[in-house]
Structure formats: structure tokens, C-alpha cells
Amino acid sequence: MSNDLPFLEMEKKPTVQVTFDGQRLDLPEGENLAAALLAAGIQTFRHTAKTGAPRGPFCMMGACFDCLIEIDGTVRQACMLEVQPGLQIARPSAGGGDHDPE
Amino acid sequence: MTQSDIAIIGAGPAGMAAAATAARHGATVTLLDEQPRPGGQIYRDVDRVNQPRADILGKDYQCGATLTRGLRDAGITHVKGAVVWAIEDSFTVSYTQNGQAAQVSADRVILATGALERPMPLPGWTLPGVMTAGAGQILLKQSGVLASNAVLVGSGPLLYLIAAQMVRAGTPPRALVETQSRYDLLRAGKHFGGALRGAGYLVKGLKLLAQIIRARVPRYTAATDITIEGDTRAEAVTFRNRGRTHRIACDTVLLHHGVVPNTQAARSIEVPHLWDNAQHCFSPVTDQWGATPVEGVFIAGDSAGIGGATVAERAGRISALKALEELGQISPQARDDLATSLLRQKAKENAVRPFLDTAYPPCAQALSPADSTLVCRCEEVRAGDIRQYAKLGCLGPNQAKAFGRAGMGPCQGRYCGLSVTAILAQENSLGPDDTGYLRIRPPIKPVTLGELAAMHQSTPADAAE
């Protein structure tokens, strides 16, 4: 089970195609989206609105809101979604929050 | 609007057990849970797990399947993937499922919202690759995804459990960096008598430790000055141990120093909470039935105070029995007859807690973070900012929010609330109860205008009430 990626999948499952920021990914259908993205080598899911710092999944249970991604124009928690064919996922634009420019 | 006798929020051990007990005695139950399948975090995806993964996770995890089977009762409506965002008016529970908002009305509410990882603000804890230990376990339980190059940091039995599971999976952690000291274990000695009542728990813990030691996973205890290094992701953990500085390269850091009650739903309906010195967190005020001072509201399981899965299961049944009696479904005599052994078992299983709480105290560095350490992850507020607000006269977290937005982001203080209270309490030389906690208001989870607009209209009969 040696691999260069930080996360590895114990089992091989049937995959479907999605895109993440335009990059094509094959992710296991029906699996947790945040877990599948991590296993595909995606670490930075978004950048914070205030300082642009990189963030990825932290709690995996819908509480921390750090794994936010954008699907069809709506910002959602990746850890609360499942992989479906054809998902077009984007990193939410930094500064897209409700902060006033300083 | 759906009408039920009892609405239960959370399908972990407490919620599942409460639902099964209530339905068995004739009550109609709506069980609302955020996940697509029952189990809560402790038994997450237990019905879907395959054999090698089940062996890695162990027998205690597999036991969860007996609780999910209990949900196959015609009296239980399990609403899967339901994110509850408001509880109002004794009681209308509003939630979103599949992008559509809906409501259920109920005469009684049992909150079984479980626990959150205690916030662990350390330098670098917001970097990608840093997660809670619980998150690491969820990846394994639900997805069969393993951190292949991880360091575990903190204290508590859960660290040993996940380390042993990683050993069994063939990806042992690079190291266990533990913050508790030998002194903590000595102090815990005075609780050893109580712990012996839960000796099974201690034996399990020793077996886990034996597996970790056999796999030659390096353990460092009494670690201090912990920093997670990295620019755009976690690259290493550095710390001091026995007068030496260590650096361990890694891709993933799993943090844990205990779990605390998830109080968001209870606080949103003004259930009073008090500081629990032994568990170092706020817990809701409840009686032996889990009943709160808010009429008709019960809290069961870890969201009422940390006890673990089997305690939560008993607590769920106990709260359900009291609710059934109040609804006239069972007599007070039947309630007491059925509850006696549950209350006794719960007390026995809870007996190990004072020992564990003392032997594995929260990490001191994270309870009083350095000025430069981020405390509020969402709004990127540092510990030094909070201290500065205190110097300007800020006494409580709600004021701190106005000063600098701590607790104002999407997580609503779930991962900074306790830190903000602790820092302000220290700075102002006040206790946590006097310092208080963030005022939590609905919606307790985000809801879009589109979801609200699409909400099923209530019937004229509902409106007339």
C-alpha cells in the first residue's frame, strides 16, 4: 500500500468523472465527496476570504465549514455531499464572503 | 407539516436508542439526522462497512449495527440527510433535506446531537492536512481512506484507538505526540476505585496501547511547544520533550484532546448551560431523565455531557421512557420499572470518566494559546486579538464578536467558542460561567432563500393553532 499521496483508498471502487477547478478527476461514485477529493490528492479546497490562506477538510462532520467548495454557484460543505457523475466543482472565489474590503 | 409525538435530532447511539424505545411503546417518532445513513459519528456507515474495514475498526464499532436495526419500526420516520436549522414554538423543527426546507411538529424533542472535538488551537492547526482525530476515523469508517503519513497529537483514549486502527490497517502513524504527563496519571490515581467499576474499558485501553507499542510507533509524552510547520499544507510537527526539540515530517496531523458536548441546538432554544470543571467544558442543565428546564426538551448522550457510546445508548432510552410517560403512553410505574436497570448501567459505565478526565487532561498549550495562534478559524482571529479586546474592557464572547468577529463565521463558534471563553476568563480573572458563551440563534445551520421559498406550506389546521 505504498503511495506518494497523503491519503490512500483501501478498496478500488467504480468511478465517475467530475471536474475540480477545470481539472478532470475520476472519483468513486456515491462516496463522501471530501474524502474522495482528499484521496485524489486535492488538499486545498478553498482559500479564506480574509487572508487567502489555504484550507482543507478539518472535521469531516459538517461542523467546521472549512471544506467549502462551489457547485453550480452554491458554496457547500464537501464533507456533506456524495460523488455524483458530472459534478463541476470549483474552489470558492477568495473574498467572496461578506467582508467589506479593508 | 408532519406531526409526530417525539422529534429526535441525531441518529447516533442516543438518538437511535431513544427512537427505538419510544416507538416500541407506541409513540410516533421523527428521527432527523444530517448523514445519509444512521450511526452518528461513532458508528458512521456501520451498515455499509465491508469485512476488512470492519475488522480494522473492531467489535465495539460493529455493535452499532444492533442500534441501526432498531430503527426498523413502523413508528419511526428516519429523515436522512436532514440538516436541522431551527427549533421553535413547542415544537416546530425546521430542516433542509435535498435542497428543500421542511418542518415537523412534535410534542417532545430529544436532542441527541453528540459531541464535537475540543478546539485545539496550536500554531499551524488551520493548514490543509491538519484534521481532528475524529475526522481521520470518519475517513476510515465511511470511505476506507487512510492517512498514510500521519502524526497523532494530543491526549486521550481516542488517540490510542485510532492509532491501533491505523496499525491494523497497515499504515501506522509516524508518532504519537502526547501532551499528558506522568503527573496527570498520578493525580488520576485517586479516581482509580471508580475506574475499576469500568475495568473493561481500562483493559481495552491497555490492549490498544500494547498494539501500538508492538508496532513500534514512537510515543512522546508530556510534549510541549507544539507547532505544525508548513507553508500551504502540513509538512511536519515540532515539539519539546524531555528537554529536546523534535521534528517529525508528515503529510497529515490528527489532533485530539477530548471531545465536548455539541450544544448548538440546545443553546438555540435557551437551555441553560453550566461549566463542568471535571470535563472542562459547558454542559446543559439536565436531570436524571435528561429533561432540561425548557419544558418538553430532553438531551441525551454526549450532547448532555461526555460519557461515550454505551452511556449515550442508555441515556437515549431513559429520556424516551420519561417522554413516553409524559405523553401518557406508559404509566409512571412502568417508566420506573423500565428505567431502573438503565440508570444503574449508565452510572456504572460513567464511573471510569473521572479517571480518564484526570489522566488525559486537555492540552495546556491549546487552552491558553500563544498570542499569534489563530483561535477563530472562520474569521481568522488570533488569541492575542481576544486578549487585546479584554484589555479594552471586553468581558464576554458576545462582545468579542462585536470587537472582531470571533465566532461570527459559518461554524458559529463550534471550533472557537470554548477558546474565546477561556481566554477572556483568564484575562479578566473571571470564571467561565461569569464569562459566558456565545449566544446561539437560529438558523443554526445555513439555509438558502431558495430552500426557504420552496418550503412546504403549513396546512390551514396548523395555522389555526
Image: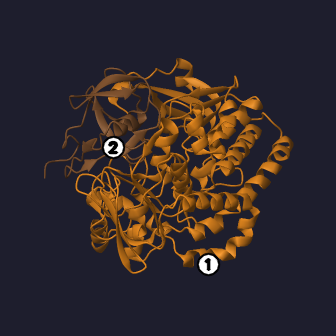
Chain colours: A brown, B orange
Q: Secondary structure at mark 2?
A: loop
User: Can you tell which mark lies on residue B186?
Assistant: 1
Q: Secondary structure at mark 1?
A: helix
Residue B375 pos. (x, y %): 34, 61
Which amino acid type corresponds to the residue marked 2 in the rendered image? Answer: Leu
Q: Residue at x 23, y 52 (%)?
A: B232
Front position in the image: A66 or B384: A66
Which amino acid type corresponds to the residue marked 1 in the rendered image? Answer: Leu
Q: Is residue A90 left or right of residue B99?
A: left
Residues packed near mark 1 inside 10 Å, few (<14), some (14 to 19) or many (20 plus) = few
Q: Is residue B8 above or below residue A47?
A: above
User: Can you tell which mark lies on residue B167?
Assistant: none
Residues packed near mark 2 inside 10 Å, few (<14), some (14 to 19) or many (20 plus) = some
Callouts 1 and 2 on one subunit: no
Residue B416 pos. (x, y %): 39, 57
Q: Quadrant of residue B51?
A: top right
State the residue position of label 2.
A5
- Mark 1–mark 2 Cα distance, whole angstroms, equals 41 Å
Residue B462 pos. (x, y %): 55, 23
Residue A15 shows in the view? yes
Q: Residue at x 52, y 55 (%)?
A: B163
Residue B444 pos. (x, y %): 43, 42
Residue that lies at the very extreme toward the left in this rendered image: A102
Residue B10 shows in the view? no
